Image: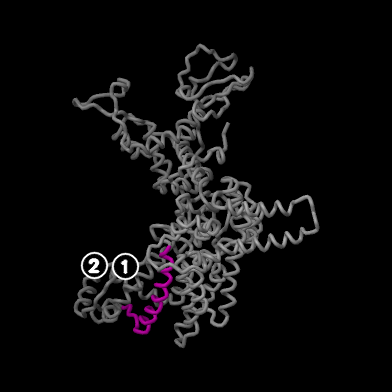
């Protein structure tokens, strides 16, 4: 582990035994940005000239130094200075020309008559820290002789930072990017959805990754890692609860929480119940705070694929060894290709050896091999060293297996799209998969039914957990609405479809009523709901009249009827309108943005429901066969450094644009003194 070593500018210290000499010229750069003010005879504080935050400087006989003042300016923590710098960068991406006349003589040298450019060591240190964050390089790389020699050959003037100083730079980037994300969260129109996933390590400490999903001010779906929280006992019932509670407190989002999605393999039943019980504490209105999704979509697809592969493990292993025999020898591959040409066997896939850590590569290997099954079946006669012949019955079973792996692969591959998919994107895939597994489990083909029955049992648990959320999400797609629920449920449930459809319709209306009540309880009247709030205020004024003439119950009943009619009108109007033509690449959130004035409350519901995550893993880990594991270097660092590296890497991948409104930074900032 590396300890932070924060250096102090000794030149800025006054004499500790006497009052500071006011005539002494202060040499530290911080005094260009700070002003000293005497609060009382025993207290002197330094005030930032830009944001006017105060910092400790002298308290009695104790000097605080200037390092914390330097960090406020140089690391971009000062919100005013940071916003000015970002504004300047937006005006022009081209750096201003260097005025060599203003550069100190010792920094402007000539070599062979060519003037050198100005060297900014601070900027290089920042870029070095950013590079280490973005590419997961070890921090002690700056101490390795090869890196030191290479850096000095490029720029001898660059003072390579120590590991401690590098950590300080990384923490500065983390704090700056965190403030940007906090500013972004201030402008979101709706609520936040969280996913909770576990990242193990070789040490006894694991990390709970809490990721937020939300719709931003431009009505674009966003995904950001909020926290990487170290837990000593990941199997305990309280580990996930403490991680979620720490995230909510750190970001101040208790009142914005909508849903939480877990990975069932990590969370024990007691852990899930503990998290479920903590939701109503600050969020009592939305579905009574009980909207908890227990199954991860990507992990479910992985489990289905792995179980189906395991059921045919002996045959799969024979195919794998056959592919290895061809691909690990140039001579064997030449003979194989010659035989394929002689047999005139076409192939659209290239043979590949699968990666056991990525289940999709095993599927791709089986597909390519099955296309060349005729070549493999004749290879033993052509090559006497080949002893791994797969029978025709086994090849038929491999093809059947591939048909299911293809379904799981295409379902999981949705998560690999360039833009993170909205929740409505999953319903069509999920209900068709559920229908096929139900049908094939009753197949007359013995192999097919034996293969799919355990898969159906596993998928049914996922369906029961998520079908209501997915159905409500697809209803929020104006191309489908309730019509797709009617169609799909009639195919799945047959005569019982009406009761299942009613559950979705009732759940949608209950959720909408929750949003209406939420807008009524909100102390700030937003523009979208202003007319609705005003109508309810009139009703409340009538009910609160001091002159009780015995008609209070009558007014209560009338207000409820009027309120119910008003609440139903917006959602029923949406459902009764014709569906839109089905087009590809439809921006469902963009449609709700355009129509938010027509549906002020329903659009808020839509933005939140459409951003509910069904998967807890990042896109790059969708096809991982194992659990996410932290590398040995990262897990050896202090938890605060690990969180800074993990979160900052994620944040730097997403350039953040803030809305036109100026949101107060002090809403989220915790001032350090």
The x, y position of residue 476, in whole percent, is 50, 64
Image quarter for residue 584? bottom left
Q: Is residue 523 above or below residue 9?
A: below
Residue of label 2? 330
Helix, strand or loop at label 1? It is loop
Q: Are marks 1 and 2 in contact (CB under 8 Å)?
A: no
Answer whether residue 315 is magenta in the image: no
Q: Is residue 402 above or below residue 137?
A: below
The x, y position of residue 348, in whole percent, is 27, 72
Q: Nearer the viewer, residue 264 or 216?
A: 216
Task: Residue 239: tell me if it is visible.
Answer: no
Image quarter for residue 330? bottom left
Q: Residue at x 39, y 74 (%)?
A: 317
The x, y position of residue 616, in whole percent, is 50, 59
Front position among marks 1 and 2? 1
Looking at the figure, which quarter contains the C terminus?
top right
Task: Residue 624: tell me if it is visible.
Answer: yes
Q: Which mark is residue 352?
A: 1
Q: Is residue 288 above or below residue 576?
A: above
Q: CA distance from mark 1 to mark 2?
A: 14 Å
Helix, strand or loop at label 2? It is helix
**Direction from residue 336 to residue 655 in the image, left or right:** right
Image quarter for residue 86? top left
How many C-alpha atoms fall within 10 Å of the one at disc 2: few (<14), some, or many (≥20)?
few
| Lower position in the chain sequence, tag 1 or tag 2 | 2
* Farthest residue, direction bottom: 444
Q: Residue at x 22, y 76 (%)?
A: 340
Q: Nearer the viewer, residue 88 or 602?
A: 602
Magenta segment range? Answer: 387-414
By secondary structure, the bulk of the magenta-drawn segment is best described as helix
Q: Nearer the viewer, residue 50 or 475?
A: 475
């Amino acid at each position: 582990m590396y300890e932070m070593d924060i250096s102090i500018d000794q030149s800025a210290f006054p004499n500790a035994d006497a009052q500071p000499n006011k005539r002494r010229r202060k040499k530290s750069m911080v005094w260009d940005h700070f002003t000293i003010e005497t609060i009382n005879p025993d207290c002197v504080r330094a005030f930032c000239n830009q944001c006017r935050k105060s910092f400790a400087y002298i308290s009695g006989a104790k000097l605080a130094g200037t390092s914390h003042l330097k960090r406020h300016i140089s690391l971009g923590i000062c919100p005013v200075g940071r916003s000015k710098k970002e504004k300047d960068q937006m005006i022009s991406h081209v750096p201003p020309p260097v005025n060599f006349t203003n550069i100190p003589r010792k920094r402007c040298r000539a070599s062979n008559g060519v003037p050198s450019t100005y060297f900014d060591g601070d900027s290089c240190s920042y870029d070095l820290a950013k590079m280490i964050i973005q590419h997961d390089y070890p921090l002690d790389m700056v101490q390795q002789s090869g890196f030191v020699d290479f850096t000095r050959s490029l720029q001898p003037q660059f003072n390579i930072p120590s590991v401690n100083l590098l950590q300080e730079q990384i923490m500065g980037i983390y704090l700056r990017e965190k403030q940007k994300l906090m500013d972004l969260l201030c402008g979101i129109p709706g609520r936040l959805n969280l996913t909770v996933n576990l990242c193990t390590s070789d040490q006894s400490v694991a990390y709970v990754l809490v990721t937020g999903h939300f719709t931003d001010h431009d009505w674009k779906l966003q995904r950001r890692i909020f926290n990487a929280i170290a837990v000593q006992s990941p199997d305990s019932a309280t580990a996930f609860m403490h991680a979620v509670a720490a995230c909510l407190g750190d970001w101040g989002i208790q009142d914005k929480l909508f849903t939480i999605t877990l990975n069932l393999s990590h969370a024990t039943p007691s852990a899930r119940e503990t998290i479920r019980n903590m939701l109503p504490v600050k969020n009592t209105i939305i579905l009574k705070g009980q909207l908890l999704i227990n199954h991860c979509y990507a992990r479910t697809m992985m489990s289905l694929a792995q179980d189906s592969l395991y059921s045919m493990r002996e045959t799969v292993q024979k195919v794998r060894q056959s592919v290895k025999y061809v691909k690990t020898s140039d001579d064997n591959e030449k003979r194989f290709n010659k035989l394929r040409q002689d047999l005139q066997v076409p192939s659209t896939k290239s043979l590949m050896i699968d990666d056991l850590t990525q289940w999709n590569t095993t599927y791709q290997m089986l597909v390519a091999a099955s296309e060349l099954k005729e070549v493999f079946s004749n290879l033993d006669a052509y090559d006497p060293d080949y002893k791994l012949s797969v029978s025709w019955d086994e090849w038929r079973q491999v093809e059947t297996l591939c048909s299911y792996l293809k379904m799981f692969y295409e379902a999981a591959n949705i998560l690999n799209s360039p833009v993170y998919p909205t929740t409505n994107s999953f319903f069509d895939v999920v209900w068709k998969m559920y229908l096929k597994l139900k049908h094939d489990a009753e197949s007359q083909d013995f192999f097919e039914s034996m293969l799919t029955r355990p898969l159906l049992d596993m998928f049914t648990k996922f369906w029961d957990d998520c079908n209501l959320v997915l159905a409500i999400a697809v209803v929020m797609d104006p191309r489908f609405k309730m019509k797709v629920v009617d169609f799909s449920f009639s195919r799945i449930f047959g005569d019982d479809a009406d009761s299942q459809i009613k559950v979705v319709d009732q759940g949608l209306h209950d959720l909408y009523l929750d949003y209406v009540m939420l807008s009524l309880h909100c102390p700030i009247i937003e523009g979208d709901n202003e007319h609705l709030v005003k109508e309810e205020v009139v009703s409340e004024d009538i009910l609160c009249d001091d002159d009780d003439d015995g008609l209070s119950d009558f007014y209560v009943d009338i207000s409820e009827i009027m309120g119910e009619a008003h609440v139903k009108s917006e959602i029923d109007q949406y459902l009764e309108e014709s569906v839109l033509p089905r087009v590809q690449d439809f921006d469902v959130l963009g449609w709700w943005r355009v129509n938010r004035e027509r549906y002020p409350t329903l659009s808020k519901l839509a933005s939140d429901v459409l951003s509910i995550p069904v998967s807890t893993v990042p896109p790059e880990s969708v096809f991982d066969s194992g659990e996410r594991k932290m590398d040995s270097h990262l897990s050896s660092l202090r938890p605060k450094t690990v969180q800074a590296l993990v979160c900052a890497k994620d944040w730097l991948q997403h350039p953040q644009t803030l809305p036109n409104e100026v949101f107060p930074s002090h809403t989220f900032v915790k001032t350090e003194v």
